[in-house]
Amino acid sequence: MKFAIPALAALAAGLSFGAAVPSFAAEASTDYPLTAEGAARFVASAEKDLGDASIPYNQINWINYTYITEDTDGLAAKINADFTEKQVAYAVKAAKFVKLPGLDPDVARKLGILRQGIVLPAPTAAGAATELSEISTRLASQYGKGKGTLDGKPVNGSDIEAEMGKPGHTPAEYAEMWSSWHDNVGKPMKADYSRLVDIANEGARELGYADVGAMWRSGYDMPPDQFAAETERLWQEMKPLYLALHTYVRHKLNQKYGDGVQPDSGPIRADLLGNMWAQEWGNIYPLAAPPGAGDLGYDVGDLLKAKGETPLDMVKTGEGFYSSLGFAPLPQTFWQRSMLTKPADREVICHASAWDIDNKDDIRIKMCTKVNADDFVTIHHELGHNYYQRAYKDQTWLYLNGANDGFHEAIGDFIALSITPQYLVQIGLLAKDKVPGADKDIGLLLRQAMDKVAFLPFGLLIDRWRWGVFDGSIKPADYNTAWTRMRLDYQGVKPPVDRPADAFDPGAKFHIPGNTPYMRYFLARILQFQFFEAACKQAGWKGPLHRCSFYGNKKVGESLNKMLAMGQSKPWPEALKVFTGSDRISAKPMLAYFAPLKAWLDEQNKGLKVGW
């Protein structure tokens, strides 16, 4: 990919692109006059320079993420600082061309991408890019090395995430893991993060934006205020379903733990939901499963283990889904260069991400894969990034990206929606006589909703919190108080212990220290159902939407590839229309998918207090 995350497929660090261009400013006025022709020459030169510079940038960051040492931190900090300086130089110049009359539409679009595609813009002041890069590298490294505790013993990030999802721990143990992770990982980052905000805001103002948040909202082919309104519209459409799910799950937690741990009204204790951030609740599905319909008859993780599947086998299976749609196999270099499991001899950043190193064929994933259902889904998701990257590889460099960042996340997600019982039968993982009948549909839908629907408010609040931080309405002294309040307002969750005002709980979520804009994940949760519905219609599926599998359908693959191959060359509504027939994001397919569940939840929740 390009810009802030050229290799990371919108999943890893919020870094910048390019290498330092000491001669750029001096040459700009003569080589690139402020004319339509000068703008075209400027864009062509910038695109060539950035494409060339992105490859060593990607290579060094890959090494740093998969081999964290002081030396690799230093190398990453240096090249990221160079990237930031180049990014700012090109963005500042692009801003001078954007209002010129007579611009070629393609040039105008690329100027907008140059100006708006920055995640953390450094100001042009001497040393600013270096300081910003050092801080962002330090924050990402701190996260990668972070540890919580269980029974007083240190536990690394990927392992403590797994423990939070396991049933059987006591409420006190969940609280210990939650608190220790947030205290040990988040709190030490606060001063650095506050300084990072100040520097990046200075850079954004030089580019003509009020702040970094305003700049982020400008990258969606519509005015920033309209984009904010669109996300709010989508959330309001989905909120009744979330409230019904929240009420039901809270009641089940009350039944298990009692009023002293989890009351039957008010917010839910965040550490009891099977996830460090309470962003997805599927790990506690057995606790919430409806009587009779709740036992699906299988667990994907158990099926994988029973078959003796390894992490490599799981990735091969994921590749097989895309191959069944007609996509070419992954290149040999993928298998040689990806990191599929956590190395035993060094520190790495385990957070799953997909990389495109050379903007052509050197695609990889980085995962600390475990043989379980979550990672089986994650593999399908990450490969979606890689197949998207390869589909648009023939676009010019500035278009090597998804139609918008939500698209990149949604591709793998909608493929993963097709991990239905029928698909598991087709790949030989589930016996045909073990496929759950229609009487299990509510259980299937509830299990999906506890991840897909539960995520929505979290997906929204991450950036809404950052928008407030960047525009100054949330001051450093109030970082944690505002975070806790927003989690209550949006998610209806609260910490298991009182949080001090000087804590920095946001830092305990990778995407905050990693500086990765998060709205893409919210959009992806909606878009994936829109894509899924379109694929099922193209495949001629006639049954309930939630049981659809288009595995093996070459027609769907051909149609999908047409959208993917566009990259960012056209406004995202045009790309959306190519595959779905509509140019507007809609929550209706998601609501249709979960409609039987919503009716069932409303019935179960009679007499219970909805909301908090």
Image: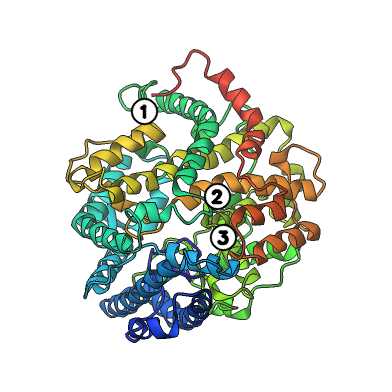
For marks 3 and 2 on the same chain, the one whose residue lies earlier in the sequence: 3
Q: How far from the left and from the top, in percent, is residue 94? A: 43, 70
Give the quarter of the figure containing the C terminus: top left
Is 451 above or below relative to 539? Answer: above
- The numbered mark at residue 524 is 2
- The numbered mark at residue 379 is 3
Disc 3 marks which amino acid? Ile
Q: Is residue 478 left or right of residue 259?
A: left
Disc 2 marks which amino acid? Ala
Name the residue nearer the viewer: 21 or 413.
21
Q: Secondary structure at mark 3?
A: helix
In three-dimensional space, the C-alpha distance between marks 1 and 3, rounded to whole angstroms, equals: 33 Å
Q: How far from the left and from the top, in percent, is residue 297? A: 65, 40
For marks 1 and 2 on the same chain, the one whose residue lies earlier in the sequence: 1
For marks 1 and 3 on the same chain, the one whose residue lies earlier in the sequence: 1
In three-dimensional space, the C-alpha distance between marks 1 and 2, rounded to whole angstroms, equals: 26 Å
Kindly tell me whether residue 542 is visible in this rendering.
yes
